Image (cartoon, coloured by chain):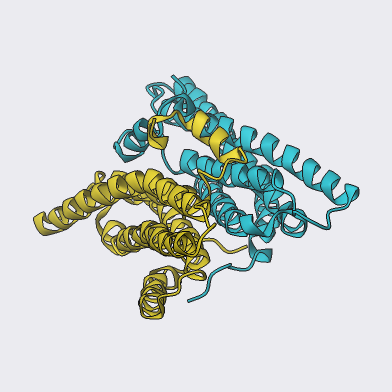
Chain colours: A cyan, B yellow
């Protein structure tokens, strides 16, 4: 059974268990999926007055994009755990002979790249949803403003959580050119986090 | 059916729908529940070496506390939506006569306090779980360090999201002494957010 076909209650129990998956990577994807879903809800509640056809159109577009991103993030809850399990399996490969050692090393490097691709896609989706915030703020119903802000908080937590999962795997990757490319991209994607000022101060 | 007995997939759909609940308040409680669950998992994975009996004991205590807080936060996913529905119902009460107007005003004030109590409890639980971070950092397995950091990110997002929901309801409360007490408490609870430095910088 996929993680997202479980009940919320059962998935929370799985997060608490000491089994290797699901862990932080799937949790980050889930936070993003909830955040993007809240943004999709806000997009469905236009301002009661003073909305032009063009405004309503851009709000509807943003809503469709948020729904698509929420669906991507939902599937990434499972994809992250599956990719991490490949890494665990690769590390368990036999290393009795030199040929086995070489095959294991190659297997680990392939698995690590898949385990980086999943949280990198989480970062991309969270960043893309965060970028839709201003449209929702401008044309969404102000009564749903706290839903929008909570959604953005969850997307930022998803973005940061996914980055931690990219970085922890990137530390073991031997392909320097690939690592440099990923490092550059996660830096750029994190700018959408920095751009969003904390919405609460004490 | 309670929200947490639904599948994750179905709950995400509910967040996307334009029905008044579930909204940001339940989403904040869910983020906290996932975060506290990740911390409980980390507490179940002690450092492989150099753990004294006292260290293992404090880790186990922290784990039990995280599990209890995760359970509290799980039940708050539903409690927040139920409380918000009471507010919606109170606003819909008849106001044809002066007596009805007075009953409605009282009903709204009661419902608002319940709708503040739920996210305030989310803030308390998130703050209490965040406070256990240093014990988990000190005695948990360093291999689970990114799970711990993702958990803390989600707890901070839950804390901030719940605060937004307290504040939006507090704006309509007429009991100044009560409002002052809540404002003081949410300020103190938010200090556990400020204390935790962002774990990712770009």
Q: At 37% across and 58% down in the image, what residue appears?
A: B114
Q: Residue B191, image x and y in percent?
A: 40, 74
**Quarter of the image containing the N terminus of chain A?**
top left
| A71 relative to B196 in the view: left or right | right
Which x, y percent locates residue A178?
Answer: 67, 42
**Residue at (61, 39) in percent of width and height:** B16
- Residue A118 at x, y = what percent? 58, 36
In the displayed orientation, state which residue is furthest to the left.
Answer: B53
Question: What residue is at 42 percent from the left and 71 percent from the top?
Answer: B190
Q: Residue at x 47, y 24 (%)?
A: A5
Residue B14 quadrant? top right
Of A185 and A72, the residue lying toward us = A72
Q: Is residue A191 left or right of residue B195?
A: right
Figure quadrant of residue A72:
top right
B61 and B166: which is toward the camera: B166
Establish if A143 lies above or below A200: above
Disc count in the image?
0
**Residue B109, image x, y percentages:** 42, 64
State which quadrant residue A7 falls in: top left
Q: Is residue B110 above or below residue A172?
A: below
Q: Is residue B57 left or right of residue A159?
A: left
């Amino acid at each position: 059974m996929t993680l997202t076909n479980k009940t919320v209650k059962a998935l929370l129990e799985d997060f608490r268990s000491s089994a290797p998956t699901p862990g932080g990577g799937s949790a980050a994807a889930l936070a993003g999926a909830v955040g993007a879903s809240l943004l999709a809800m806000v997009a469905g509640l236009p301002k009661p007055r003073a909305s032009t056809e063009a405004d309503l159109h851009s709000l509807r577009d943003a809503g469709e994009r948020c729904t698509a991103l929420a669906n991507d993030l939902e599937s990434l809850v499972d994809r992250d755990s599956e990719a991490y399990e490949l890494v665990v399996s690769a590390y368990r490969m036999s290393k009795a002979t030199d040929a086995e050692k070489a095959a294991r090393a190659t297997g680990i490097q392939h698995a690590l790249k898949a385990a980086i691709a999943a949280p990198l896609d989480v970062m991309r989706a969270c960043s893309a949803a965060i970028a839709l915030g201003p449209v929702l703020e401008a044309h969404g119903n102000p009564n749903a403003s706290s839903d929008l802000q909570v959604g953005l908080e969850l997307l930022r937590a998803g973005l940061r959580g996914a980055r931690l999962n990219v970085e922890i795997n990137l530390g073991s990757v031997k392909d320097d050119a690939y690592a440099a490319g990923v490092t550059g991209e996660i830096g750029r994607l994190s700018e959408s986090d920095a751009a969003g000022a904390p919405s609460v101060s004490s």
